[in-house]
Image: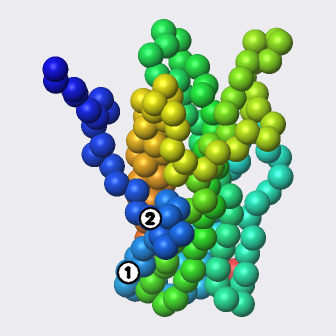
């Protein structure tokens, strides 16, 4: 009898901190930009991040220490269905810290919030059903849970790439060109 283990290829590895939580953190070198310009670029990036089904603003700015904190989320979908159906949303915390030519980002506290259909056929979050992404599930739900983790890893990598490209943006100060007017 041959047992095949690992139905889903695990080509992703979440970085884990001392508490055993998934935790992305890195210092990005951006030469040529001072901390104020990086802070402005980071602020414009963080304003784009939203939490699904929430009108509340989560962006916290600390101008003195040049740090930004926010919460964000994205959807994950069920596998194996004919039509795309929502499995839930994953929320995360993101923090940016700035120095001249450097930015440190930290993305952590991934939690999964399950979604169910309401009586009108619309998907909505199940209240009080938040599970940390690090949690191990039963063998019955393991395949779907691993797929959710893989999607979260890929979307987090996309988020990091978007952050890095937005931080590099630099706009030259606009100067007014004076016209020479000989008719006066």
**Quadrant of the drawing holding the C terminus:** bottom right
Q: What's the distance in space between the residues labelled 2 and 1, CA to CA? A: 23 Å
In the rendered structure, the answer to whether residue 5 lies left or right of residue 60 reads left
In the current view of this chain or complex, which residue is farthest to the left? 1
Where is residue 63 drawn, in percent x and y? 72, 84
What residue is at 49 percent from the left and 60 percent from the top? 22
**Picture quarter with the N terminus:** top left
Residue at point 22%, 26% (across, down)? 3
State whether residue 154 is above or below residue 40: above
Estimate how packed mark 1 is, as few (under 14), some (14 to 19) or many (20 or more) residues with alpha carbons within 10 Å.
some
Contact? badges 2 and 1 (CB < 8 Å): no
Of residues 148 and 6, the one drawn nearer to the viewer in this rendering: 6
Q: Position of residue 182 (x, y in %)?
A: 60, 80
Among the 4 quarters of the image, the one containing residue 102? bottom left
Residue at mark 1: 29
Q: Position of residue 11 (x, y in %)?
A: 28, 45
Q: Looking at the image, which residue is at 50% across and 64% down?
A: 20
**Residue 176, can we see it?**
no
In which quadrant of the rendered view does residue 27 lie? bottom left
From the image, tell me which residue sits under label 2: 16
Instruction: Establish if 68 lies above or below 140.
Output: below
Q: How many marks?
A: 2
Secondary element at tag 1: strand
Q: Which label sits in the foreground, 2 or 1? A: 2
Task: Provide the secondary structure element on which disc 2 rests.
Answer: loop
Position of residue 121 in the picture relative to residue 96 (left or right): right
**Picture quarter containing residue 117?**
top right
């Amino acid at each position: 009898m041959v047992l095949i283990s690992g139905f889903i290829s695990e080509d992703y590895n979440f970085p884990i901190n001392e508490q055993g939580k998934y935790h992305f953190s890195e210092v990005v070198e951006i030469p040529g930009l001072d901390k104020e310009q990086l802070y402005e670029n980071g602020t414009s990036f963080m304003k784009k991040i939203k939490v699904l089904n929430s009108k509340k603003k989560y962006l916290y700015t600390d101008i003195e220490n040049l740090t930004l904190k926010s919460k964000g989320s994205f959807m994950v979908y069920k596998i194996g269905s004919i039509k795309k159906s929502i499995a839930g949303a994953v929320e995360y915390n993101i923090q940016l810290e700035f120095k001249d030519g450097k930015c440190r980002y930290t993305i952590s506290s991934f939690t999964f919030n399950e979604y169910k259909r309401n009586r009108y056929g619309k998907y909505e979050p199940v209240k009080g059903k938040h599970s940390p992404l690090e949690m191990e599930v039963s063998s019955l739900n393991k395949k779907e849970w691993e797929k959710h983790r893989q999607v979260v890893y890929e979307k987090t990598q996309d988020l990091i790439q978007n952050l890095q490209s937005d931080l590099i943006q630099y706009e030259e100060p606009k100067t007014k060109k004076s016209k020479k007017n000989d008719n006066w």
